[in-house]
């Protein structure tokens, strides 16, 4: 008998629903919230209100596109955390009510672990390879930067993480300094394609072990802009491509250096990336080159599955369903990583 899972994602400002059957994605619908752009970041109260408006039509669309009736569902998976508590409450409340009404299991999914499972998402008739256990995953998003040993579908060990800002946060804050729209990472990537990575030199923090730090790099960028603007008020507009290229190159160099060290220390040659920052084109290109040099096998999810989406929640829920790892109605969302 087929196993059909509905996934619901509402951890931040995107409302998403996806349907998966026997590990194959049938639909993945997302409604983003443009309203936050004018504030330069996500406003939690506005996000939760938008989720309330979007969640029913998004889920309905996902079921229709998958050609699945709600009575065919075997379980409902939802994001339990981490994320914005108000946003998580909308998704979790709907998931609980829907599962209870249908009399089917409820599956709580850890948002960061779900990002890892983006590497397992397959569309119909797709035959591309998936990572073999154990593998290393470089998880890079707006709120988290981690190196994880993925031992199997349910065992994860964090062996390195940021001690301050995440890589995505460093991108977004630099973009704000440059006057670029939110979210800033993609705009920095676009400008960097036209710039010189060696025009400006930014520090590469020497953090022990496999941990990361991006606050010093971000501060160095801020001070450079401040000092140069005193000399030339048009400094940003005249140098924006080179600024983006140099800054982005520093972040990528830090990320690649750490994942290479992790591979050397653990002896694991299977490497995957995940999270919103893994959409970055320069990171994908440079990481592909470096992993080939070290005889590592690199796995890169499709861009649509790197940012927050319900397909990854449904996929994580599918593996939990196979182990009968279900949740209680009393389970509560959590805002911080645990």
Image (tube, rainbow, N blue to C red):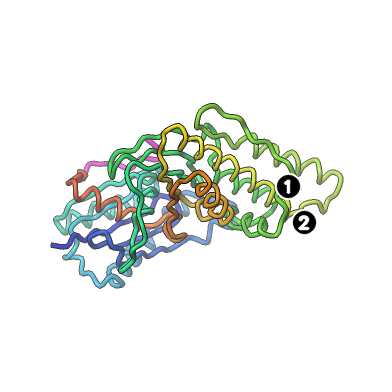
Q: Local crowd at mark 1 within 10 Å, few (<14), some, or many (≥20)?
A: some
x and y percentages locating residue 282 in the rendered image: 59, 54
Write down the residue under mark 2.
237
Q: Is residue 89 above or below residue 98?
A: above
Residue at screen point 45% across, 54% down: 300
Question: Which quadrant: the C terminus?
Answer: top left
Of marks 1 and 2, the one in the foreground: 1
Please tell me which residue is depicted at 68% across the width and 51% down the height of the picture.
244
Q: Position of residue 141 (x, y in %)?
A: 49, 47
Q: Is residue 101 highlighted in magenta?
A: no
Residue 198 - label: 1
In three-dimensional space, the C-alpha distance between marks 1 and 2, rounded to whole angstroms, equals 18 Å
Q: Is residue 216 left or right of residue 42?
A: right
Q: Which quarter of the picture shows residue 310?
A: bottom left
As rendered, which of 313 and 181 lies closer to the eye? 313
> Magenta stretch containing residue 337, yes or no?
yes
| Magenta residues (range) | 329-338
Question: Callout 2: helix, strand or loop?
Answer: helix
> Where residue 70 sits: x, y (%)?
20, 65
Relative to 263, 3 lies left or right: left
Counting from the top left corner in percent of width and height, residue 266 is at 41, 33
Does 207 sit above or below residue 170? above
For the image, the number of numbered tags is 2
Q: Residues within 10 Å of mark 2 (few under 14, many from 20)?
A: few
Q: Is residue 198 visible?
A: yes
Pick the front one: 227 or 304: 304
Residue at 51 percent of width and 28 percent of height: 209
Who is closer to the viewer here, 300 or 115? 300
């Amino acid at each position: 008998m087929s196993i059909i899972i509905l996934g619901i994602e509402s951890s931040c400002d995107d409302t998403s629903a996806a349907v998966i059957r026997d590990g194959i994605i049938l639909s993945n619908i997302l409604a983003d919230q443009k309203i936050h752009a004018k504030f330069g970041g996500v406003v939690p109260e506005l996000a939760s209100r938008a989720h309330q408006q979007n969640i029913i039509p998004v889920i309905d669309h996902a079921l229709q596109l998958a050609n699945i009736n709600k009575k065919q569902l075997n379980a409902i998976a939802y994001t339990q955390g981490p994320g914005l508590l108000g946003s998580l409450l909308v998704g979790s409340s709907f998931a609980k009510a829907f599962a209870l009404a249908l009399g089917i299991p409820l599956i709580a999914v850890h948002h960061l672990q779900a990002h890892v499972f983006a590497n397992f998402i397959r569309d119909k008739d797709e035959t591309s390879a998936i990572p073999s256990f154990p593998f290393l995953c470089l998880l890079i998003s707006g709120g988290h930067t981690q190196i994880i040993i993925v031992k199997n579908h349910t065992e994860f060990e964090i062996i390195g993480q940021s001690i301050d800002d995440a890589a995505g946060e460093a991108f977004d804050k630099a973009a704000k300094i440059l006057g670029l729209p939110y979210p800033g990472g993609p705009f920095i990537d676009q400008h960097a394609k036209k710039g010189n990575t060696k025009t400006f030199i930014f520090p590469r923090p020497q953090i022990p072990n496999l941990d990361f730090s991006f606050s010093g790099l971000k501060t160095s960028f801020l001070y450079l802009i401040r000092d140069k603007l005193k000399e030339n008020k048009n400094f940003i507009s005249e140098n924006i491509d080179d600024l983006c290229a140099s800054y982005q190159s520093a972040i990528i160099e830090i990320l690649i250096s750490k994942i290479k060290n992790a591979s050397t220390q653990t002896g694991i040659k299977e490497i995957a990336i995940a999270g919103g920052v893994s959409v970055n084109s320069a990171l994908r290109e440079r990481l592909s080159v470096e992993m080939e040099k070290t005889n590592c096998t690199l796995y890169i999810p499709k861009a649509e599955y790197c940012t927050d989406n319900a397909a990854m929640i449904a996929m994580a829920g599918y593996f939990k369903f196979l182990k009968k790892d279900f949740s209680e109605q009393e389970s509560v969302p959590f805002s911080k990583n645990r």
